[in-house]
């Protein structure tokens, strides 16, 4: 693609006289067509590259030597005392974004070699731990990510960047880490930390390390089974939540369809984010869940209201994208899959609009269960719809079945029966 129309006329000579000239067309092609950037945004990135190209020429920096260190030197040393004539772009944030995008494109094209990373004993150990959890334990990505994060903090606190020697660990090291202050102190986080440490030491036990003395000092905080009450939304809150997706809300149809998927199907945020166009059978009125937490393939009926919400989004709001996901990014780069965090953010923003203080997106799944119980569904039917492998997982929802609970409640002592 000819990039001259995106470059300011006074900056074209900077690009043409630099070593980046043969690659600027590929860069613009990736921005406009591959990434879905608007022409104005692409032009801003190209202006940033023009400034960077002039600095490369003056510094006699070749393309093959381009890396993150060179970009940082341009931003830290050249930019504060830049004497380049106008209209050279001087916004540090825009320059950094444009230069790092260029580096990514050049590496994808094989023009710039991939960065050589220094071997890190901790990261190498975590890679082996992750492979063990994935292949031997069959854990999902989210669980592995949490445990790896906790194991990383533990190993860094004990070894830093030095080689890992499990035999050098003492029970006092484990106690000190467990007792260290947490950014988000809660019983759930403390239990997750204890579970992650045990999982890591079990992995080391499979490697032949004697870790029983280390495992024995990990105390799990008390959390009584089925002690909590599932948080759900009332009928009024559900109506207000759905009505909050007005045309003034950005991507209102996408947010409305996501909430309907959680309220009408009980989908988790990860399942909503991974929903594909190929998963919906419009003629049969079904949705196939292929990438679930339980790693099973489940087929659910598609309620008419949910189908209409998804269809309206696909017809009137979804941007053009090669991504086969139902819900895609609405800002560049558009062909990158949407994340579960994006679903969290959209629902939390909707909560905020109607005055709900908490941000628990899982409350929509609890609301779906409460509605099933109010219509007379049994716990076995709830477990089937929620795709729980064990009925015990669904027992917590018995607290929401007020109709059946009132039938078995005993009279209060001393009251008139």
Image: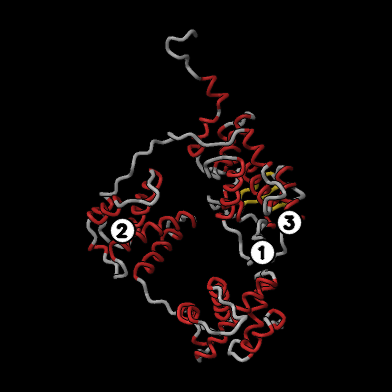
Q: Secondary structure at mark 3?
A: loop
- Name the one closer to the observer, 307 or 249: 249
Mark 2 / mark 1, whichever is N-terminal: 2
Residue 237: image location, x then y, percent: 62, 36
Q: Residue lying farthest top?
A: 416
Q: Secondary structure at mark 2?
A: helix
- Residue at 54 percent across and 21 percent down: it is 406
Q: Nearer the viewer, mark 3 or mark 1?
A: 3
Give the left or right position of residue 150, taking residue 74 as reference: left
- Residue at 27 percent across and 63 percent down: it is 166
Q: Secondary structure at mark 1?
A: loop
Per the model, the C-alpha gap separating discs 3 and 1 is 15 Å
Where does label 3 land, which residue? 317
Residue 304: image location, x then y, percent: 74, 43
Q: Nearer the viewer, mark 3 or mark 2?
A: 3
Per the model, the C-alpha gap separating discs 3 and 2 is 53 Å
For the image, the number of numbered tags is 3
Residue 266 shows up from this direction? yes
Residue 70 shows up from this direction? no
Q: Is residue 343 above or below residue 97?
A: above
Marks 3,1: beta carbons within 8 A: no
Q: Which mark is residue 205?
A: 2
Per the model, the C-alpha gap separating discs 2 and 1 is 42 Å
Q: Is residue 395 above or below residue 275?
A: above
Q: Which mark is residue 323?
A: 1
């Amino acid at each position: 693609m000819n990039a001259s129309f995106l470059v300011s006329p006074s900056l074209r000579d900077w690009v043409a006289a630099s070593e980046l000239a043969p690659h600027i067309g590929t860069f613009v092609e990736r921005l406009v067509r591959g990434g879905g950037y608007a022409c104005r945004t692409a032009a801003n990135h190209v202006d940033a590259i023009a400034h960077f190209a002039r600095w490369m020429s003056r510094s006699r920096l070749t393309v093959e030597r381009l890396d993150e260190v060179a970009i940082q030197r341009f931003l830290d040393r050249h930019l504060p005392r830049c004497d380049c004539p106008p209209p050279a772009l001087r916004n540090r944030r825009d320059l950094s974004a444009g230069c790092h995008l260029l580096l990514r494109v050049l590496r994808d094209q094989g023009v710039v070699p991939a960065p050589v990373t220094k071997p890190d004993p901790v990261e190498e150990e975590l890679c082996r731990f992750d492979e063990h959890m994935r292949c031997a334990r069959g854990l999902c990505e989210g669980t592995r990510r949490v445990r790896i994060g906790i194991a990383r903090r533990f190993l860094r606190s004990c070894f830093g960047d030095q080689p890992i020697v499990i035999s050098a660990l003492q029970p006092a090291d484990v106690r000190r880490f467990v007792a260290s202050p947490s950014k988000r102190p809660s019983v759930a986080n403390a239990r997750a930390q204890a579970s992650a440490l045990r999982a890591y030491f079990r992995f080391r036990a499979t490697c032949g390390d004697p870790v029983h003395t280390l495992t024995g000092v990990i105390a799990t905080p008390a959390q009584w089974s089925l002690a909590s009450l599932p948080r759900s939304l009332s009928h009024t809150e559900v109506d207000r939540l759905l009505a909050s997706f007005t045309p003034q809300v950005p991507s209102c149809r996408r947010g409305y369809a996501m909430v309907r998927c959680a309220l009408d199907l009980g989908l988790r945020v990860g399942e909503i984010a991974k929903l594909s166009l190929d998963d919906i059978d419009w003629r049969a009125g079904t949705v196939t869940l292929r990438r679930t937490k339980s790693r099973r393939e489940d087929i659910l009926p598609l309620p008419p209201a949910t189908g209409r919400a998804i269809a309206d989004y696909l017809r009137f709001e979804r941007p053009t994208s090669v991504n086969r996901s139902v819900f895609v990014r609405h800002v560049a780069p558009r062909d990158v899959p949407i994340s579960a965090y994006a679903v969290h953010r959209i629902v939390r923003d909707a909560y905020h609009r109607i005055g709900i203080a908490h941000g628990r997106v899982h409350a929509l799944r609890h609301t779906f269960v409460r509605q099933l119980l109010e219509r007379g569904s049994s716990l076995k039917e709830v477990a089937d719809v929620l795709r729980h492998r064990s009925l015990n997982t669904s027992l917590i929802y018995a607290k929401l079945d007020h109709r059946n609970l009132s039938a078995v409640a005993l009279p209060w002592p001393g009251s008139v029966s």
